[in-house]
Image (cartoon, helix red, strand yellow):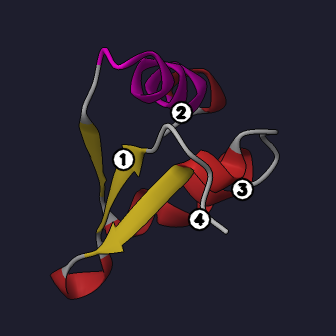
């Protein structure tokens, strides 16, 4: 998973074009490295799945 694709996915989650996005275990670290650098990082929710995969959603209100 490359930086451009990760940023596209994050923007689509933010705009509501995507409701959620499933990240495989092997893509988790590169995805998270880009995610934590964003100003709206707290608006993303990662829901852990079995086998280390994560389901990401965008929240209108940031997490506390």
Judging by the rendered image, the residue that carries numbered circle 1 is 57
Mark 1 or mark 3: which comes first in sequence?
3
Distance CA(mark 2)–CA(mark 4): 11 Å
- The residue shown at (29%, 42%) is 21
- Mark 1 and mark 2 lie on one chain; the one further toward the N terminus is 2
For the residue pair 20 and 30, the one nearer the viewer reads as 20
What span is colored magenta in the figure? Answer: 6-17
Nearer the N terminus, badge 2 or badge 3?
2
Where is residue 4 shown, x and y percent of the image? 60, 21
Q: Secondary structure at mark 3?
A: helix
| Among the 4 quarters of the image, the one containing residue 24 | bottom left
The answer to whether residue 12 is magenta is yes
> Where does residue 31 sit, x and y in percent of width and height?
56, 51
- Give me the disc on residue 6: 2
Q: Identify whether 56 is placed above or below 11.
A: below
- Compute the Cα span from label 2 to label 3: 10 Å
Crowd rating for badge 4 (residues with CA inside 10 Å; few <14, some 14–19, many 20+): few
Position above or below: 6 against 55 = above
> Farthest residue toward the left?
50
Disc 3 vs disc 4: Cβ atoms closer than 8 Å? yes
Residue at horizontal 74 percent and vertical 54 percent from the top = 36
Q: Residue furthest bottom?
A: 51
Residue with the mark numbered 3: 33
Q: CA distance from mark 1 to mark 2?
A: 14 Å
Q: Which residue is mark 4?
A: 29
């Amino acid at each position: 998973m490359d930086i451009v694709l990760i940023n596209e996915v994050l923007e689509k989650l933010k705009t509501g074009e995507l409701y959620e996005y499933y990240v495989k275990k092997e893509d988790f670290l590169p995805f998270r490295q880009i995610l934590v650098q964003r100003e709206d990082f707290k608006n993303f929710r990662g829901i852990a799945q079995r086998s280390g995969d994560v389901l990401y959603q965008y929240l209108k209100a940031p997490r506390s």
